[in-house]
Every structure is written in structure tokens, then in C-alpha cells.
Image (cartoon, grey):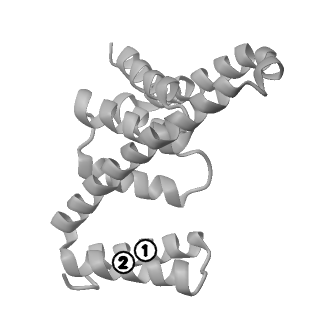
Amino acid sequence: MVYVEIFWAFFLANLLGYGGGPATIPLIQNEVVNRYEWVSLHEFSELLAIANALPGPIATKLGGFIGYEVGGVLGALVALVATIAPSAIAVIILLQFAAMFKDSLQIKYMTRSVQPVIAILLGVLAIQFIYTSFEDSGLIHLMIVTVLSYLFLEKFKTHPALVIAGALLYGGLFMSGLIIS
């Protein structure tokens, strides 16, 4: 039964996650944190941070790891198939119609109308992560990472991958006790 739950959790999240990774993340979070309670919000936020730092699609990394934690190797495979299946099915079915409707105003309006919903979902997710970061590491460390990230991204035009690596290094030093809270 757990494999069916793993499949449906990731299949539904990726089926309804119109817009790719950013739209899918809150849906995956709802399934694995709120509905099935496989991981806590704190664990999910840490997993998401690691998934963002690694190359490749976020949803497949989340699916593989959570599927493995819940159902072992078979659980990881089920989660990966469920993550990939909606896109594969949609591409196979919709590719035939893409050429016919590519200039349709209704399709363009539909696509634009989904964007604010995605922005709101990402905003809520960011607020939840800020809150859990504040609870776990305190205001000082949260502000240090936030200000340094902003400065390196906006003022010094540092590549985002280097900023992520720096934040991971800072978090590793903080968690190892080398940086005192």
C-alpha cells in the first residue's frame, strides 16, 4: 500500500504542477509533509536546499530521496516513475496539438493566468522556510546568510551556484559547531 501512496503523492503533485519545478515544490510539500507526514517541514526545507544545490530537476531528486526513505529502492523507483510520468504522458499526447494551437490567444491567456498562482505558492513556501530557519538557527544567522546572499548576487554579480555553495558551507560550519549560534 505504501508504494501506491508514494506513486499517487508524486504523480498528483507533478500532474498538477503546471509550470515545472517552482510550481511543483509546494504541491510535493503538501503531499509529503501535510498529507502523508513522511517528513517534517524542517526536513523538507533541508532536503529542498540540498536538491537545489545539486544539478538536475528538483522534483526527481525530491522524489528519489523521499521515495527511498519511505519505501527503499523500490519506493525510490516508484517515486521517480510517478514524477516523470505526467510530463511524459502530456508530451506524448499534447505534442500533436501543439502546432494547431500555438498562436491561440486563449492558450496564451491561460498560461499567463497561472503565473500569479505560482508566485503566491512560492511566496508562502518561502515564508514557511524563513520561519523554520529563524526557529532553528536564530535571527543573526538568518540575517547573515540573507544579507551576504543579496550582496553577492546583486552587488558583486556572483554566479548563483557559488552563492548556494557558500550558504551550504556556512550551514555546514554552523551545524558542525564551528560557528557559534
Above or below, 86 against 27 in this view is above
The residue sitting at 43% across, 71% down in the picture is 168
Label 2, on which residue?
A: 145
- Residue 88 at x, y percent in the picture: 67, 22
Residue type for callout 1: Ala
Mark 1 surroundings within 10 Å by alpha-carbon count, few (fewer than 14), some (14 through 19), many (20 or more): some
The residue sitting at 44% across, 22% down in the picture is 12
Viewer-nearest residue: 110 or 53? 110
* For marks 1 and 2 on the same chain, the one whose residue lies earlier in the sequence: 2
Q: Quadrant of the N terminus?
A: top left
| Mark whose residue sits in front, 1 or 2 | 2
Q: CA distance from mark 1 to mark 2?
A: 7 Å
Residue 50 visible (yes or no): yes
- Residue 150 at x, y percent in the picture: 45, 78
Tell which residue pokes out farthest to the front in this image.
105
* Helix, strand or loop at mark 1: helix
Asked if the residues shown at circle 1 and circle 2 are in contact, with their CB atoms under 8 angstroms apart, the answer is: yes
The residue sitting at 37% across, 43% down in the picture is 121
